Amino acid sequence: MGRPAQAYDDKGELVWQVEFDIYGRIREDTFNNQPFIPFRQLGQYEDVETGLYYNRFRYYNPESGLYISQDPIGLAGNNPNFYAYVHDSNVWVDPFGLMADFPTNIDFTGHPDLFPSEGAIVKIKMQGSRGRDFTEAFKKSGIDRKLADDYTWHHVADFDPTTGETTMQLIKTDIHKATIPHKGSVYQFEAEFGVKYGTPAAINKAKAKGWVKCKN
């Protein structure tokens, strides 16, 4: 999650390409110029002399998949193993070396499993529930629901609490599930207003803001 894999020059030519294993260790370096891009897992910067990844508050060892020092915030990091990295690097991130968290940067723009239509990415005003949001997104997209049985709408983490707007992306359901848990605009709405999304309180909040379009 969040690992750079390719770099291109100003002519659009590929100049750097690597593959990582599950611990963030580079297992294949196409151009044999690994130090060219020193960024590794989200929030990490490789020290080429030691091979360790600087993770803001401590160093991470990609050979063992562990930090080399204890978590400075101890049990507040919500991990009983003070040396452990996240339990699933495909879903979780730890940009500061302190506390594992759900990623907030899930964006399917350009993904091959987006619904094959220009309407696959739309802006809506959040309605207070996922079902209402989906209805609004389909209206904006012009896509027939019946043609999107294997797809679901993803809430991008770009919620604007002033306008109520967020970006919605129609992505294959199994691809979306593979990124869960994550923090998108639903999480941002809940954090902003202190209500659980999908509840009457959330819908009423959206209504009070003048964002609700659905009649039901």
Image (cartoon, grey):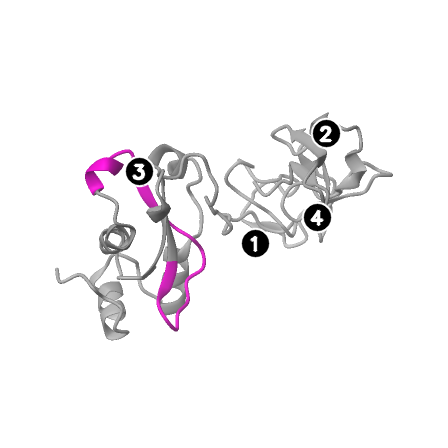
Choose between 164 and 202: the one closer to the eye. 164
Residue ID for mark 1: 76
Frontmost of labels 4 and 3 is: 3
Q: Amino acid at mark 3?
A: Tyr
Residue ID for mark 2: 63
Residue drawn at the location 71% of the way across and 53% of the way down: 57
The first of marks 2 and 4 along the sequence is 4
Instruction: Give yes or no for contact between labels 4 and 3 (Cβ–Cβ under 8 Å).
Output: no
Choose between 46 and 115: the one closer to the eye. 115
Residue ID for mark 3: 151
How far apart, in angstroms, are the residues tagged by discs 1 and 2? Answer: 26 Å
Q: Amino acid at mark 2?
A: Glu
Instruction: Give yes or no for contact between labels 4 and 1 (Cβ–Cβ under 8 Å).
Output: no
Q: Quadrant of residue 144?
A: top left
Frontmost of labels 1 and 3 is: 3
Image location (x, y in percent) of residue 143? 26, 45
The first of marks 1 and 2 along the sequence is 2
Image location (x, y in percent) of residue 182? 44, 47
The first of marks 4 and 3 along the sequence is 4
Magenta stretch: give its range: 145-166
Q: Amino acid at mark 1?
A: Ala
Q: Quadrant of the C terminus?
A: bottom left
Within-10-Å neighbours for mark 1: few <14, some 14–19, many 20+:
few
Considering the numbered disc 4 on the image, is that residue within a helix, a strand or a loop? loop
